[in-house]
C-alpha cells in the first residue's frame, strides 16, 4: 500500500470547477482539466487533492468522471476533505458527507480523508472519533487534517493514537512567501510525530510562477489577497528565483519554488488548470537545488513572510 511519505508531488484540484476564485468556464474548460488529469497520469503523478466544497462538488465529480474513464488502470490516489460546517453536529454527518464524496468520485474508498479546517462547535476529538469509525469500516485508508495549528495537530494525533490509528498528514499553506509553519511549531510537531506536511498553495496561488507583478496584476478575488503593492514586495525574491532557474538551463520559477518545498521534506500539491502547467510543474522533480541556492532562497524569502 502506498504511503504519503512515498509521494514527492501531487496535483491540487481546487480550480477544477471553481468559478468564483479561479474563473472556471471562462479562462479554461473541462477539456483543459481532462488533459491536465491525463498529463498527470502520463507523467506518473497519481495523487490528487480535492474537497467536497471545491466547485460545490464539481471538482470531485470531474475526478469521478476521469477515474471512470481511466482505461490504463493507474493506481489513482484521491485525497478529499470534510468541512465541519457549524450545522454539522454529529459523527453521522461525517459519514454522510464521505458517502456523498465517494459517490461523486466513483470510488469505494478514499486514499486520504481530511478535516478541512478546525471549526467550532464540534470538538477535534469528536471528529477524530468519526474518522476512526469510517477508517475501521474500510472507507478510507489514511486520516489527515488541514489548517490545524501545532496544538490542534497534537490533539488529533493523540486521539487517533487512542484508536490505534496514525495521523497521516496536516495540509497547510506553505511556500516561499508564507513560511509561517516554520515559526509556529506546525512543521516541528509534524516532523517529530512523523506526520506528512502537505503544502497547499505551493506557488502562492500563481505568484511564484513569476507571471504576476504590479504591471501584470491578478484579477478577481485573488487580487484581494495579493494586491499590486504586495506583489511589488515579492519582486526581489522572484528575481533570485529566476536567476537560480537560469543557472539550470532555464528551470521555470514554479520548478524552483516546488523544488525548494521538496527539499524541505514536504509534499507540494500545485494546482494546475491545463496540461502545460502540469508538465511544467513536474519539471520540479528529478534534480536538487544546491545547499547554497537553498540558503539564498531562505534568506531572501525570510523578510517577506505574510502574517
Ligand atoms: N486545505 C486548504 O484549506 C487549501 C487551501 C488552498 C488550496 N488547497 C489545495 O492546494 C492546491 C494548490 O493550491 P492553489 O490552487 O491555491 O495554488 P497554487 O498551487 O499555489 O497555484 C495554482 C495556480 O497557479 C497557476 N499555475 C500553476 N502552475 C503554473 C505554471 N506552471 N505556470 C503558470 N501558472 C501556473 C494557475 O493559475 P493561473 O493560471 O490562473 O495563474 C494555478 O491554478 C489546491 O488546488 C487545493 O487542492 C487547500
Image: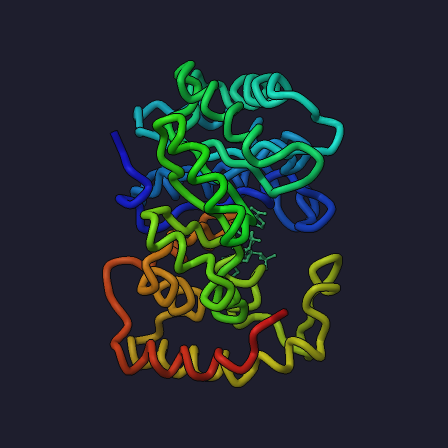
Quadrant of the rendering where the C terminus is positioned: bottom right
Residue 16 lies in quadrant: top right
Position of residue 99 in the picture relative to residue 6 (left or right): right
Residue 254's quadrant in the figure? bottom left
- Number of numbered callouts drawn: 0
**Residue 289 drawn at (x, y percent):** 28, 72
Quarter of the displayed picture in which ligand 1 can be seen: bottom right
Q: Residue at x 30, y 26 (%)?
A: 72
- The residue sitting at 61% across, 17% down in the picture is 92
> Is 57 rendered above or below residue 29?
above
Whether residue 50 is visible, yes or no, is yes
Res. 78 in view: no
Q: Position of residue 137 (x, y in %)?
A: 42, 14
- Residue 58 x/y as whole percent: 63, 31
Q: Which scheme is used to colour this image of the protein?
A: rainbow
Residue 136 image point, x, y percent: 40, 17
Q: Nearer the viewer, residue 33 or 14?
A: 14
Seen at 41% across and 51% down, the residue is 197
- From this view, report whether residue 127 is shown above or below residue 213: above
Q: Quadrant of the N terminus?
A: top left
Q: Nearer the viewer, residue 73 or 176?
A: 176
Q: Judge whether 171 appears above or below 177 on screen.
A: above
Amino acid at each position: 500500500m502506498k504511503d504519503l511519505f512515498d509521494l514527492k508531488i501531487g496535483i491540487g484540484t481546487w480550480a477544477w470547477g471553481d468559478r468564483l476564485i479561479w474563473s472556471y468556464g471562462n479562462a479554461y474548460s473541462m477539456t483543459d482539466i481532462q488533459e491536465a488529469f491525463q498529463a498527470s497520469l502520463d507523467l506518473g503523478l497519481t495523487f490528487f487533492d480535492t474537497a467536497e466544497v471545491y466547485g460545490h462538488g464539481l471538482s470531485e465529480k470531474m475526478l469521478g468522471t476521469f477515474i471512470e474513464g481511466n482505461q490504463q488502470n493507474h493506481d489513482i490516489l484521491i485525497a478529499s476533505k470534510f468541512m465541519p460546517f457549524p450545522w454539522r453536529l454529529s459523527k453521522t454527518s461525517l459519514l454522510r458527507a464521505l458517502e456523498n464524496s465517494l459517490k461523486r468520485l466513483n470510488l469505494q474508498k478514499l486514499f486520504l480523508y481530511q478535516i478541512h479546517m478546525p471549526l467550532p462547535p464540534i470538538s477535534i476529538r469528536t471528529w477524530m472519533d468519526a474518522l476512526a469509525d469510517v477508517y475501521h469500516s474500510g472507507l478510507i485508508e489514511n486520516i489527515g487534517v488541514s489548517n490545524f495549528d501545532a496544538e490542534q495537530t497534537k490533539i488529533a494525533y493523540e486521539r487517533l493514537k487512542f484508536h490505534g490509528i496514525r495521523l497521516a498528514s496536516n495540509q497547510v499553506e506553505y511556500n516561499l512567501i508564507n513560511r509561517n509553519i516554520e515559526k509556529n511549531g506546525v512543521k516541528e510537531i509534524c516532523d517529530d510525530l512523523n506526520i506528512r506536511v502537505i503544502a497547499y498553495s505551493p506557488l502562492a496561488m500563481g505568484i511564484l510562477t513569476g507571471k504576476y507583478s504590479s504591471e501584470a496584476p491578478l484579477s478577481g478575488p485573488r487580487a484581494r489577497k495579493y494586491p499590486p503593492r504586495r506583489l511589488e514586495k515579492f519582486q526581489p525574491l522572484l528575481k533570485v528565483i529566476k536567476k537560480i532557474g537560469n543557472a539550470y538551463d532555464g528551470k521555470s520559477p514554479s520548478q524552483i519554488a516546488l523544488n525548494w518545498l521538496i527539499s524541505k521534506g514536504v509534499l507540494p500539491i500545485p494546482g494546475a488548470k491545463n496540461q502545460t502547467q502540469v508538465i511544467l510543474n513536474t519539471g520540479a522533480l528529478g534534480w536538487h537545488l544546491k545547499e547554497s541556492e537553498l540558503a539564498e532562497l531562505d534568506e531572501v524569502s525570510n523578510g517577506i513572510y505574510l502574517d
